[in-house]
Image (cartoon, rainbow, N blue to C red):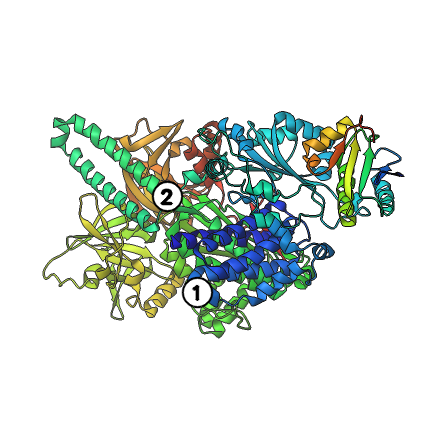
Amino acid sequence: MLDLFVQESSEHLQTLEADLMSLESNPTDSALLNSIFRSVHSLKGGAGFFGFDAIVKLAHVMESVMSLLRDSVFVADQSIVSLLISTADKLNLMIGNPERAGEIACEGEISGLQAILDGSRPVASKPAAVEKTNPAQQSKHKTGTPQDPTLEGFHFQAEDLLDGLRHGHNFYVISIQLGRDVESQNQTSEQFLSELASLGTLVDTEVSIPDDTTLESCADCDVSCRLFFVTALEPFILRGALGISEENIQQIDSQVLGAWVKSNATTNDAPAQATPAESEAPQSPKSLVPAPSPVASSSPRVVETQTTPIDPKPVSSSRRKPEETIRISVGLLDSLMNLAGEMVLGRNRLLRLAGRSENHADNSEMQSVVQEISSVTSNLQDTIMRARLQPVGGLFGKFTRIVRDLSHKLNKEIQLEIFGDDVELDRTLLEGLSDPLTHLVRNSVDHGIEMPSARIAKGKTSCGTIRLSAAHLAGRVQIEVLDDGGGMDPERLKAKALEKGIITTEQSARLSDAEALQLIFAAGFSTASAVSDISGRGVGMDVVKTNIEKLGGHVELDSRLGEGTRIIIRLPLTLAIVPALIVGCRGTNFALPQINVDEIVHPGEEYPIKTMGGACVLELRGQLLPIIDLSELLEYPPKQNAKNETFVVVLRLDHVTYGLIVNEILSNEEIVVKPLGRHLRSVPYYSGATILGQGEIAMILDPNSMAQGRISASQVALNASKMNEVALSDINTERVLIFQESDGEYLAIHLKKVMRVESVKASDIERIGSMDYLRKNHNTTLRLVQLSDFLPIKPSPQRAEEFFLIVPRPPFDGLSMVASRIVDSADLSDEQIDKTTFRARGVLGSAVLSERLTVVLDFDRLTELFTTVGEETSLFAQGHFMLTANAQQSENPASKNLSQSSHDPQPILTHSFR
Amino acid sequence: MRTKKQDGLLIITPNSELNASTIAKAAMQLQRALQKADDSSAVLLDLRETVSYDSATLKLLLAARGSCQKLGLGLRLHTSEAGKKFLTLLRLQRDMSITMQEADV
């Protein structure tokens, strides 16, 4: 129970903080003020239930101030917002350990808030009003229904609501300023009220002018009306009929009202308005609506229809439906996920068994059942996976506070724009993303955005912008931190790296601007001239990159001096299921994360393994790669006189690429990642375990930890220097994959563009409209692309029973090119390509490879063709979300334009801090 | 504003219909008129000539209500039918005695 209180209170505080951030730029926003009031009120209520007096005391005084702000007694200026934020911080600390809340020092906050209530602290608008009335009593008077704080100030009996509840009508509180919202819209107040009365029933009203208004000043004010209204109309119809906007109308949960009516009818309680003590408080002097008299409060009318069944209509989708959500523990979700994973593995084994020829002939009914179980299992797994997803908005929300506080501290003007806060990510990823993202945002504030005077001198606006966005892109989530600050100077980065000994003078001379930018990811690198408590210690960007890579993602950086910096983080949707390459070593199977696999080569004459300086290296197209023998790494006893078949899996990490020697390449599978048991966690090289389709357990190898301590710095340097030598001698030679779509032309694609090649069965392909898709195990699909649909090549008359899919690297890994045959791989230099004979969009030219004339594909141009068609198709296939999702791939992530284009979407949230 | 005292009641009648353009002047006059209510127990605001009610009328009424409270005076209204309907819709009749047009004051 206490845990639930802490959890709920934390959520209230999260909302509270976000609202307080917004309040600074919208101090008179009534919806915002109401929301803040509600959060504090709920928090106080919960704390009161548990008897946490210190929390109640602090929340109460904050609630009282919020009540005055809500009643427009004064307007919150920056100092008041800061005080409220500070109070929220103290409440946060208290909620963290409510039993010791009394030990948290909050006298400063209480006295500051009390000074506002007493009128002794100057406030932004007309503090005299505060002095004239007793605000504490005034706020006390405003105490409303325990069910819904929105109804505070209204007076009604249970029977007033019965008819509406019985008929499933909607209950609203309409808040308007008669002059601003009605009469300025060419409508008289009389017409408005008559129209309203004709649409339903007015339960009660609250009409007021600002408390300090006198006869002398009344001409300049506006009349506030709050109308508690019941009608059969849905919110959007009511808004249309009355000509008011969404912010003027708030729907009240009829479930809550129904429950209150029931309890009120049973207990004969007062209509939940004010306690007798409260009703004795003096009424607000400018309100014509009096508090209920003590007599009325203590002697309510008995509701005659107390036994009438009430079936209140649920609140519309615009508001949360409490009855449709329940809290479950993360542990339970994880258990469900594990069980679903087990089920998938069982399903895989079942499919394998059912696929055996002896079973197939005998029992076709079993085949059908197996297929059904397979389908249900996939759906079950997808659904549970979705339950683990959470919107990134929760994470993004905290940056409004961070940017506000830092910008104040640094005297900078910064506007934070947030896009895509409804994009969802696995909670494990969200947790892992928090620290790296915080670091990036703090860096943008501290190093990125210039001081206002410097910006003006550069011809920019004094207020800088940091844009934080999230979007789905090709089955992944792309998080972007962009600022329009000073950008990075590659020459300065090089000089600093040289000074810190991170690079040598020779290396510095060879580094391109783009490569120089990557230096910020080096350990210990910082360009800050002074270390501050915000940033500048040189510990960070390398950790950011490492942490993101641990999450299966990667970081890209782009910066232009004087224009700004863009950092892109690409993450998988989930860590629970990952594509993996299954390899064998001495008869044991292992899984390697596909994201790290660059290519697989068969060492021999073409790719010799050599010994250099006591270390084994693989010569790969002129490049020397350090290699690790998996059997040696795992300390398998050496096999004498055994000439094992070997493969080298080329693994690409952040700063190093190396080869891993294995005995077998078994398959590509999407594996369910299972955490290692406690006794195995200290064993290096493994990041988890999985169960393969055959039911065998396979350990998941961790390419990072395998490389640690084994790939020496000298090998990396050798690799790098050799790479540079190669670059100088054979700058344009690259590896290509040769394949055929049909039995016609040979086609070649650069291997660096290819992530993997999959073998698939035609029966696994699903068609929507004119497009084919391969549904993966989790919530992703691969769109199949026939190159003959885009290029002047021979089309395939019919697909074979089995064929190949060539899957490009992210961000285009939502697409796959169909191939009937994988022919070979070869080296191809730019000079070998004939760019004149065979010309078409999406084609670089032709070359003779494997003794055949081969069409060399221009993959970047091809993706433009693919995605354009994807977009057009999605327009015709409205309702097919899979197609729409694919259309999202059309966004060009490689865009280098750092400035905001004219058709940029409007941010969902914008916060400005000065 | 015309003022008249009758049976301990200060009767105040605006010179013209109350609306957005007359509100400022009327409010000032009303303020001055209320100063004369020292020996009265209540004020009756005669708004029978005000046919159409809008936010300006409401502002005046609400401000008048506040001023009367401060002076310890009760406030009654003498309204037209339309005025009563409007104020009733807003539930303002609950603590403000509204006198119908036909009533003889």
Say what secondary structure mark 2 lies in: helix
From where the camera sits, is residue A731 visible? no
Residue A834 is situated, as x and y percent measured from the top left of the image, at: 42, 43
Q: Amino acid at mark 1?
A: Arg
Between A665 and A614, which is closer to the camera in this rendering? A665
- Furthest-left residue in view? A641
Give the distance between the C-alpha atoms of the residues marked 2 and 1, in whole angstroms: 34 Å
Residue A472's disc is: none
Residue A625 is situated, as x and y percent measured from the top left of the image, at: 31, 61
Identify the residue shown where x is 41% and y is 31%: A789
Between A550 and A598, which is closer to the camera in this rendering? A550
Q: Which residue is mark 2?
A: A387
Of the residues tagged 2 and 1, which is closer to the observer? 1
Residue A694 is situated, as x and y percent measured from the top left of the image, at: 18, 43
In the rendered structure, the residue with mark 2 lies on which chain? A
Residue A100's disc is: 1
A405 vs B34: above or below: below
Identify the residue shown where x is 82% and y is 31%: B50
Q: Is residue A672 left or right of residue A48?
A: left
In the rendered structure, the residue with mark 1 lies on which chain? A
